[in-house]
Image (cartoon, grey):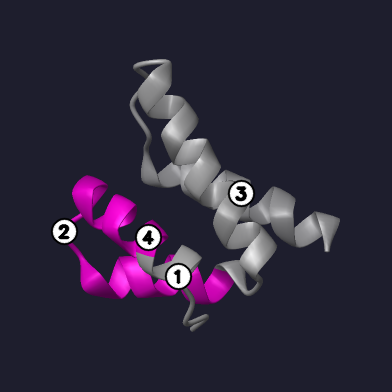
Amino acid sequence: MVDSKAAKELAIKLRRLWDNDNYVKGIIAFAKTEKNIITISQFIDMSYRLNKEITADDISYLLEVLEDKS
């Protein structure tokens, strides 16, 4: 798992959405890079600004796109 300030901030945001440490750690581990972690964090921030609900599927699809870009 990436251990950085961005990863810790993302973990806090993810825990607000899902009370499941294994899921949160898995998302951060699967993100792999600092850039991907920041992108996921920005996605969550934007969804709050747009008042849109985030689902686990949304995060999964985003991770797939990020993996394809790497």
Residue that badge 2 annotates: 19
- For mark 1, does the 10 Å Cα neighbourhood hold few (<14), some (14 to 19), or many (20 or more) residues? few
Query: Along the line of sight, which residue is nearer the eye, 3 or 16?
Result: 3
Query: Between tags 2 and 1, which lies in front?
Result: 1
Residue that badge 1 annotates: 5
What is the span of residues highlighted in magenta in the rendered image? Answer: 9-30
Looking at the image, residue 1 lies above or below residue 45: below
**Residue 11 magenta-highlighted:** yes
Query: Along the line of sight, which residue is nearer the eye, 21 or 41?
Result: 41
Query: Between tags 3 and 4, which lies in front?
Result: 4
Residue kind at label 4, given as amino acid type? Glu
Residue that badge 4 annotates: 9
Residue found 40% across the figure and 20% down from its top: 49
Rendering coords of residue 12 (x, y %): 28, 58
First along the sequence among labels 2 and 3? 2
Q: Which residue occupies the extreme top position in the image?
A: 50
First along the sequence among labels 3 and 1? 1
Residue kind at label 2, given as amino acid type? Asp
| Secondary structure of residue under mark 3 | helix
Looking at the image, residue 53 lies above or below residue 27: above
The answer to whether the residue labelled 2 contacts the one labelled 3, judged by CB atoms less than 8 Å apart, is: no
Distance from the alpha carbon under mark 4 to that under mark 1: 6 Å
Rendering coords of residue 26 (x, y %): 42, 73
The answer to whether the residue labelled 3 contacts the one labelled 1, judged by CB atoms less than 8 Å apart, is: no
Q: Which residue occupies the extreme front position in the image?
A: 5
The answer to whether the residue labelled 3 contacts the one labelled 4, judged by CB atoms less than 8 Å apart, is: no
Residue found 51% across the figure and 77% down from its top: 29
